[in-house]
Image (tube, rainbow, N blue to C red):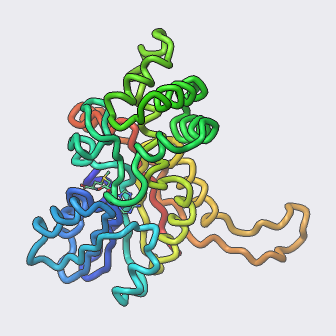
Amino acid sequence: MLREAVDALNVRPGGTYIDCTAGGGGHSAEILGRLPGGRLIAIDRDPQAVAALQKRFSGSFVTIVNDNFFNIKNILSNLDIDGADGILADLGVSSHQLDTPERGFSYHHDAPLDMRMSMSGRSAADVVNTLPQKELQRIIYAYGEEKYAPSIARGIVREREKEPVMTTGRLADIIGSCVPAAARRGGHPARKTFQALRIEVNGELELLGTAVSDLFGCLKSGGRLGVITFHSLEDRTVKKVFASYCVGCTCPPDFPVCVCGKKPQGFLPFRAKTPGEAEIAENPRSRSAKLRVIEKY
Ligand SMILES: C[S@@+](CC[C@H](N)C(=O)[O-])C[C@H]1O[C@@H](n2cnc3c(N)ncnc32)[C@H](O)[C@@H]1O
């Protein structure tokens, strides 16, 4: 949804735009191509992505920032920017992260169990080897929507007592042994647990609602915020925050006049968009993508 997402931002020449999750720079390049005389801020928390962005955009008017966009207020204040005309957040992991075995995001390669987008802090191995069983079960159930969470958490704890679980391959094998054979027909048995651990390691969901509110707060009047999500947990959060900015008066219907004085602060220019069949055929990972956009009054 590269072109669609950038189309939805209504990029205006001379404006200020922010790509919160610049990754390989695909969306940033598309924005830049429509932005004569404007300013683009490209953020990513992954130092490897930032190094690639610096190479790709050297000599152009792109400010590249290595940070978590959840800190957007600080990032903009450090850059003396008081508002943006358009902001895009394309959530989740990049193909580079998934396809680089040493980053430890994928159950398709046997590699150190890492999963840290920022390449710092607590790794997936730390989570798997130190959290109590109940907490592991909660994470796998809540962030992976995995119904076999109790059995997987039990299996992890049993196996780590023999020897710490340090690799993606060993973790995938443990998960496989905890899931009934019949359940394996719906895709790789480790998919949901790996998603859950990645979300936990990178703190992707806990403060997402606040971060999306902060992004909306950074828009100028008439500016647009687009968010692309990859699973229903993220999408629900984004949908809820956007809806909260679109409601006006919240007085009970039997009040003769409004006493709350609330006015909508934005509107949704279109319903959520999903990729077409051609895009899914070309890039199967886009299958679960959803784009939501809000415009500020
Ligand atoms: C789906 S990819 C983005 C791909 C990008 N739109 C492109 O065109 O190449 C997600 C990227 O966002 C980064 N990321 C995810 N969450 C982030 C956050 N909270 N703050 C900053 N970067 C984040 C990841 O490191 C990854 O590089």
Name which residue lies at 41% across and 30% down.
191
User: Where, by quadrant of the figure, is residue 244 drawn?
Assistant: bottom right
Name which residue lies at 56% across and 53% down.
237
The residue sitting at the front extreme is 162
**Horizontal relation, residue 72 to residue 34: left or right:** right
User: Where, by quadrant of the figure, is residue 41 drawn?
Assistant: bottom left
**Horizontal relation, residue 256 to residue 58: left or right:** right
Foreground: 111 or 282?
111
Foreground: 114 or 258?
114
Name which residue lies at 26% across and 52% down.
2
Residue 66 % position (x, y): 30, 70
Residue 174 % position (x, y): 43, 24
The residue sitting at the bottom extreme is 80
Q: Is residue 168 above or below residue 203?
A: above
Q: Quadrant of ligand 1?
A: bottom left
Foreground: 187 or 289?
187
Name which residue lies at 39% across and 30% down.
171
Number of numbered labels in the structure image: 0
Residue 28 % position (x, y): 23, 64
Q: Is residue 280 above or below residue 48?
A: above
Residue 136 % position (x, y): 56, 38
**Horizontal relation, residue 221 to residue 110: left or right:** right
